[in-house]
Amino acid sequence: MAKANLNERSWAIDVISEINLIVRKRNRNIRHAGGERTIKASKQSASLFPDVLLFQDDQNLRVLQGWELKMPDTNIGDEDLLENAEKKARLLGLNSFLVWNFSKAALYVLEENSFVLKKEWDELSDIKTRKEVDDNKSRWKAQLKTIIDDLEDFFHDGVIKSQEILHSLTENNIVDIITGNIALVKENIDRERRSNSILDAEISEWWDSIKLEYSSEPDASSAVAKIVLITWVNRVLFTHYLKKFTNKAKEIDLFNESTSVSDAKLFFNELTSENDFLNVYAPVIGEDQIDDAAWQHIIQLSAFLSDLKLENIDQGVLQQFFETLLLDSKRKTAGQYATPYPIASLMAKLVIHDKNKTVFDPFCGTGTILRAVYDLKDKAGINAKNNLDGIWGSDKFSFPLHMTTLSLAKPSSVGEVLNIFKSDVKDLKTGKAYNFIDPNTGTDVSKPLPTFDYIISNLPFIGSANISKSNPQIGEIIGKIRIWLADKKITINKKSDIIAYLPYYLWDLLGTNGRIGLVVSNSWLGTGWGNDFRDMLFRFFKISSVISSGKGKWFKNAEVITNIMVLEKRPVPVDAPLDNEETSFVLINSSIDEISDPSLLDKTANQIILKKNGLVSTNTLEYGKITKLESFGLGWPALFIDLSWFDKISSKLTPAKTFFDINRGERRGWDPMFMPTGSHGIEAKYLQPVLKNLKSTTGLIANPTDEAFCCSETIANLTAEGSAGTLKWISKFEHALNGTKVPLKVSLARANHHWYEMKSDSVADLVANINYGSSLKIVKMRKRGFVNQRLIRLTAKNSHVEVDILHALMNSYLGLFYIEALGFGRGMGALDLNSTKFKDSYQVLNPALLATKQKQDIKGAFIPLMKRPIQHLDAEMQLADRIHFEKTVADAFGFGAQSAQIQSALLSLYSTRTEVN
C-alpha cells in the first residue's frame, strides 16, 4: 500500500539513503550523498539548496552535483523547476544539475554560461502518479543505480566538475542571496511600528543618529530590516564557527523547519550565559519582525552548515571561511562611512607607539579599527589574552557591537573576555564599571574603564544642522571646557560639525602623553568654524600630523573627503602652542587600493613616522609659521604643499576687499518672484540683468541672459506712473505662501525694504563660483548686474577701482592659487568655497605696486585669454598665451624666480582635489 504522505521531501530522503548504499561499496567520484537536513529544514517553496547533493569526499566539503526531485505530476521540462535548479547550481558554483520527476530524469551541463540538456533517462516514463512511485520502488532504485553509473562516467571524463563547497558559498555571496529581499521584513516592521509606539520611538531615535551613514536606504524601516536579516545570519554563522570550541554551540544542529524565532532566541541566550560574545546575540531593534520566508532560508543555511563536517576542517581554513562570510555581511550593512581596513591599519601603526598599552575605540562601528589594532599587536607577538585585555570598544547602538565582536572573533579569542560594551561617548568616565561575561565560567565580570594610552576612531559625520536631533546633549562638554580653561565665556561655534565637540570627551579619557588618531571630514580645514575648532584643539592637544589622500577618496561610496588627524594630549591645556611646535601635513601618494598591499602600507606608515618623502609627501611646519600663513588668509588645505616661496611674494599681496564689496549673490527669498521668466509684463526699468550660474560661461566674460525684478517704488508711485505690468506682478504674489506656508508678505519683510523690493546696490562687477570644478576663473560681467546666491559677487567700491587690471591679476596663477587655498574638496571633486572666507581672506597682487606701462602690458597679455574658453587647469597651463600672460605678471612684480613654484603649488592643490573622481 502506498504511503499517504508520499511527497518530494520524503522521496528525496529515500533517494539519499539509497545513493549512500550504492556508493558505499565503491571507491569512485561519488563518495556520499547528503541534503537530509536541508530538506527537513525547508518548506519546498522556499528551498535554498538542492534536494540532493552528491559529494566527492567523506567530509561533505567537495560537492559534485545538486538534484531537484519532483513527483510525476510536475513535467520534467517545467520552467520553474529548471530555473530553480539552475539558480541553486550557480549558488554552489557547479557546472551541472539533475532533475528527476521519477518518470524521467534529465542532466544539464553548463556550456558557454548556459545550461544545456546533456542526457535523459526515461525508462520509467510509464509511471504517471504519486501512488505508482511507491508501488514501483524496486524499479526506481534500479533506475537510480543506472543514473549513478552514468554520472560517474561524466565525472571521470571531466564533463562534470566538482567544487570546493566553502569556496562556493563565499564566492557566490550566499549572504547577499539570503538577505537580498528585505521587502517583507520591512512590511512587518512598518506594521509593528503602527501598533507599538516603543518600537517606533526606538527606530526613530536610532535613525536620527545614523541616517547620514545609511543614506542609500530609502527609510528607517528598510535600514532596520537589512540589519535584522544580517544579524540573524551572523548569529547562525558564528554559532557554527563556535562548534569547534564549545559543545553547547553544537545544539544548533537541531534547528529545523519547526524552529521558531523564539526558540532560536532562547537557545542563543543559553549559549551566551555559558560563553562570552554577548554582543553577537544581544537583541537588536526589530529582530522579531523577520518574515517566514527569510527565516526559513536562514534555517536552511544552518541545516546546510550542519551537513558539512566542519569539525574535520583545518582550523585556519574554517576561520577564513567564516571570516569571509562575515565580511560579506559587514559589507552589506556597513554605512557608507565604515572604515576601510587599510585606513584602520594605517591609523593603528601611526598612533600606537608601545604595542603593550591600552587602545580604545569609542565609536567602534563595524569593528575594523579594533581588528587592525588586534592584528598589529598580534604581529608584535602579544598573546591573545594580553592583546584582548588591552583593547576596548564601545558604541551608542547594539548593532555595531555585534559587528565589532565578530571582527575580533578568532580561535585565539575564544575563552577570553572581550571589552566591548554599549555607551554613548558623553557618558564614558574613567573608573566607571562595565559588566562582561567570563566565557569560562559564565559569570559576570565587572571591569572599570581604564585610563587609555591610545584612542583611535572614525568619528561620526554629523553636520551642525543634525546635531540637535541626533546628539542633543553633546554640548554638555562646553561646561567642562570652561572649567578646564577657567573661562566662563568660551563656547563652540554653533555652525560646527560634531567633530568640534568630541575630542574633549576623549581628552578626559587619555593618560599622560596619550595619543589619539581620528578619521574626520575635511570640512574643518577650510571653514570658519574649522578655524575656531583648530584654535581650541591646539589648547588641549599637539596636532602631530594631518594626513590626507593625494590619490582618490578613502570612502568610495560616500561624497565626503576625509583626513586622519593624530593628536598628542597636553597634560594641562595651554593658551597657545609654542611657536616651534611642529605639525606635519602629509599627502599619501597611493590610492586606497594600492595601500591594501601590506608591504606598501608598512612602508607608507614608516615614511610618515620618519617624516620622509617618497610614498608620501610631507610638509612639516612650526606653529609660528602656520599662524603667519593663516594671517595671509591661507587655509589649512594649502599647508599640505611646499610654501617655501610664499614669504618672498607675501609683501606684494593685498586683500581683495580693499577694492570690492564681496558677498554672496542676491538671495531675496523667493526666486519665482524676483527671477521672473516667460511673459511677465514687468516694465523694463524694473528689470536688471542677472547671472544665475557659470555653467554656460566658458570664458572670462559673463553675459547675463536672465532678468531680475528690481523695484524700490511704492505702490502709490507705481499706480501714479501707470506701471500696470509691475503692479500686476506684485499682486500675483501678494497673497501667496512660501514653502512652509508663511505668507510672502511676512517671509520677505526686511528693514527699510518693501516686501517686494530687491535693491539694485548689490550688482556685481566680477563673479567667483562657490563650487568650482575643473575650470578655475573669476569672470567679469559684460554689463553690471545681479548674480544668484550660488555665486560670489565682487562689487567695486567706487569708480576709481581698476576693475580690468584686478580681473587679470585674479586670474593669474597666484590669484587661482588663492581660490584653491581658501576652499576644501568635496566628494565629486568640487571645491567648496565659503563666501565669508573669500571676503575675509582672498588676497590679490597689489596693482598699486605697478607702473602704468606694467599694467598695460598685463592687460594686453590678458586679452587673448578673454577671447577664448578657459580650459581645465592642467591643459590651460600648456597654452602659449597663458604662459606669456603668467610671465608678464611675474616679471612685473619681480617674482620670476618663484613663478614655477607658484604654478606647481596651484597644480598640486588642484590635482589633490580633483583626483577623487
Image: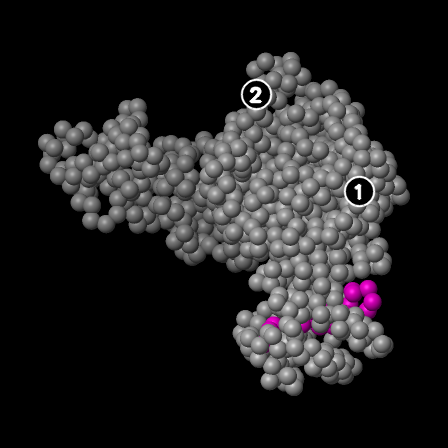
Asked whether, in this view, residue 796 is left or right of residue 125, the answer is left
Q: Quadrant of residue 593?
A: bottom right
Q: Badge 2, how many Cα within 10 Å: few under 14, some, many 20+?
A: some
Q: Few, some or many C-alpha atoms within 10 Å of disc 1 (few <14, some 14-19, many ≥20)?
A: many
Q: Is residue 357 left or right of residue 526?
A: right
Name the spot of residue 538 as percent of width and height, x first. Answer: 67, 26
Location of the C terminus (image quadrant): bottom right
Q: Which residues are magenta?
A: 51-72
Q: Earlier in the sequence, mark 1 or mark 2?
A: 1
Q: Is residue 134 above or below residue 226?
A: below
Label 1: which secondary element: helix
Residue reaching furthest to the front: 1
Residue 710 is covered by the magenta coloring: no
Q: Residue 17: image x %, image y %?
A: 75, 70
- Residue at 76% x, 49% y is 251
Instruction: From the viewer's side, name the closer residue of 183 and 645.
Output: 183
Q: Which mark is residue 374?
A: 1
**Splitting the image into 4 quarters, where does residue 635 fall?**
top right
Amino acid at circle 2: Thr
Secondary structure category for the residue under label 2: loop
Q: Find residue 546 and report its horizontal and vertical position in percent.
A: 68, 38
Residue at position x 44%, y 56% in the image? 869
Residue where numbered disc 2 is placed: 491
